[in-house]
């Protein structure tokens, strides 16, 4: 896996990442740090990737279990250290999983498996942050 990040000098503190799979991701800094607030902050993209990694696991696990899942949303909240390096110190992922007749136990198991075994992002970030999870099931 690889990624090349280019500074877009004319933007102040904007960066363009080109991923190994051929996609482009734009990032920018806050105005007080020289950015123009035109794109997510780099650390926001870390959180977004973490949520995506874990949600991917949850959906896949439920689909493989032949559950009728119709939606999955994860809200990721985080706290960072107040001094450099401002690592994440706490991350919480709250899953809202929608489906027809989804057993709560199956969703709880999928979330736990992602959190404890499969999600490389949350497991890696757990080296510096307390990572917690919660879920709710919505019929639909």
Image (cartoon, rainbow, N blue to C red):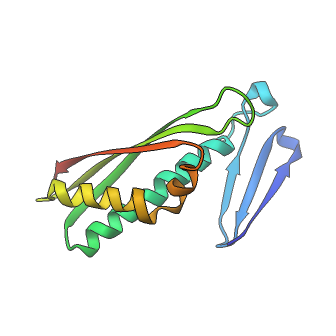
Q: Quadrant of residue 1?
A: bottom right
| Residue plotted at (50% across, 54% down) | 122
Is residue 46 among the parts visible in the rendering?
Answer: yes
The outermost residue toward the front is 127
| Residue plotted at (25% across, 54% down) | 108
Direction from residue 97 to residue 79 in the image, left or right:
right
| Residue plotted at (72% across, 69% down) | 2
Q: Quadrant of residue 58?
A: bottom left
Point out residue 64 in the picture as x, y percentages from the top left corner.
28, 75
Direction from residue 57 to residue 107 in the image, left or right:
left
Point out residue 31 in the picture as x, y percentages from the top left corner.
75, 27
Q: How many marks?
A: 0
Q: Front-most of 66 and 31? A: 66
Q: Front-most of 43 and 5? A: 43
| Residue plotted at (66% across, 56% down) | 25
The outermost residue toward the left is 101
Is residue 55 among the parts visible in the rendering?
Answer: no
Q: Image height check: is 22 above or below 79?
A: below
Point out residue 51 in the picture as x, y percentages from the top left corner.
47, 51
Q: Image height check: is 83 above or below 56?
A: above
Q: Front-most of 16 and 122? A: 122
Direction from residue 13 to residue 25 in the image, left or right:
left
Direction from residue 34 to residue 20 in the image, left or right:
left
Point out residue 22 in the picture as x, y percentages from the top left corner.
67, 71
């Amino acid at each position: 896996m690889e990624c090349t990040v280019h500074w877009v000098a004319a933007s102040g503190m904007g960066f363009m990442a080109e991923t190994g799979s051929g996609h482009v991701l734009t990032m920018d800094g806050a105005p007080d740090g020289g950015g123009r607030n035109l794109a997510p902050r780099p650390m926001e993209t870390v959180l977004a990737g973490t949520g995506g990694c874990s949600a991917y696991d949850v959906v896949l696990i439920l689909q493989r279990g032949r559950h009728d899942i119709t939606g999955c949303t994860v809200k990721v909240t985080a706290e960072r250290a107040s001094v450099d390096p401002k690592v994440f110190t706490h991350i919480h992922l709250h899953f809202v999983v929608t489906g027809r007749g989804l057993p709560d136990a199956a969703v709880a198991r999928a979330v736990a498996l992602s959190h404890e075994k499969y999600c490389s992002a949350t497991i890696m970030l757990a080296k510096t942050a307390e990572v917690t999870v919660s879920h709710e099931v919505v019929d639909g």
